[in-house]
Image (tube, rainbow, N blue to C red):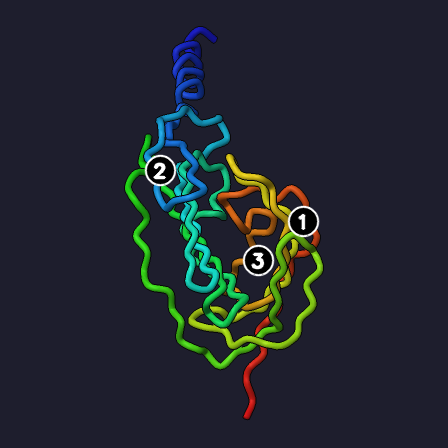
Amino acid sequence: MTQFVPVLTILFAFIATGSSLKCLECTNTSAGFCRGVSYKCASRATGCIKTLEITKIGDKVYKSFLRACNDDDHLCDRDFVMNSGHGNKHARIITKCCTTDDCNTCKMKVSPYNSTINNLICPVCYTYNSYDCVSKGYIQCRGYETECIDFAATLHRQGSPDFKFSLMGCITSGGCSLGPKIVPAAKIVDAKRLSCTSAVPITH
């Protein structure tokens, strides 16, 4: 048995150091950038992530940014839009992942929003501070928005008050598959509804 001792020693040493991934961590709920501080991740982490959320309501644009350790590869390398207002009321979420120490640096590279109408429609509504959202019409989807979303929840963001909202509209395909992590830079503390269906083709 003694011949196995060095092998076990090396194995335990690897286990002890193999989970020592470090990532930059920071949250900014009022701008599209934060520098971050190096932080040792929990053993379950598989990499680092940075997330940019851009919300446009009319002429106003709001941004939030997150750097963190990541333990869910399903969140990685996403770029999707939830559109509930004819292209001028939408939230776009972009994530990038990497797997080496403190690799989640730099600002996020953002391509222009694809506002080209794509011949699909969805029921539309948006309410703030309420879970009630009754569609009063349809919007034309844009770009890669090929599904309809019905979403109602309370969101918690670090450093900001919780807020309740609900929406119906168009969403990029695959966005709903994130489930409760559909807004990676926030925590859903009360999810009432989240479902997606295929958008309806416009017929003439």
Quarter occupied by residue 114: bottom left
For the C terminus, the quadrant is: bottom right
User: First in sequence: mark 2 or mark 3?
Assistant: 2
Residue annotated with mark 3: 176
Q: Amino acid at mark 1?
A: Ala
| Residue 146: % across, % down | 51, 71
CA distance separating discs 2 and 3: 27 Å
Kindly report which numbered mark, 2 or 3, lies closer to the viewer in this rendering: 2
Q: Amino acid at mark 2?
A: Cys
Q: Is 129 placed above or below 14 here?
A: below
User: First in sequence: mark 3 or mark 1?
Assistant: 3
Q: Are marks 2 and 1 in contact (CB under 8 Å)?
A: no
Q: Is 140 placed above or below 29 here?
A: below
Kindly report which numbered mark, 2 or 1, lies closer to the viewer in this rendering: 2
How many numbered badges does the structure rendering display? 3
Label 3 sits on a secondary structure element that is: helix
| Residue 142: % across, % down | 45, 73
| Residue 127: % across, % down | 63, 60
Left or right of 130 on screen, residue 113: left
CA distance separating discs 3 and 1: 13 Å
Left or right of 107 on screen, residue 70: right
Label 1 sits on a secondary structure element that is: strand
User: First in sequence: mark 2 or mark 1?
Assistant: 2
Kindly report which numbered mark, 3 or 1, lies closer to the viewer in this rendering: 1
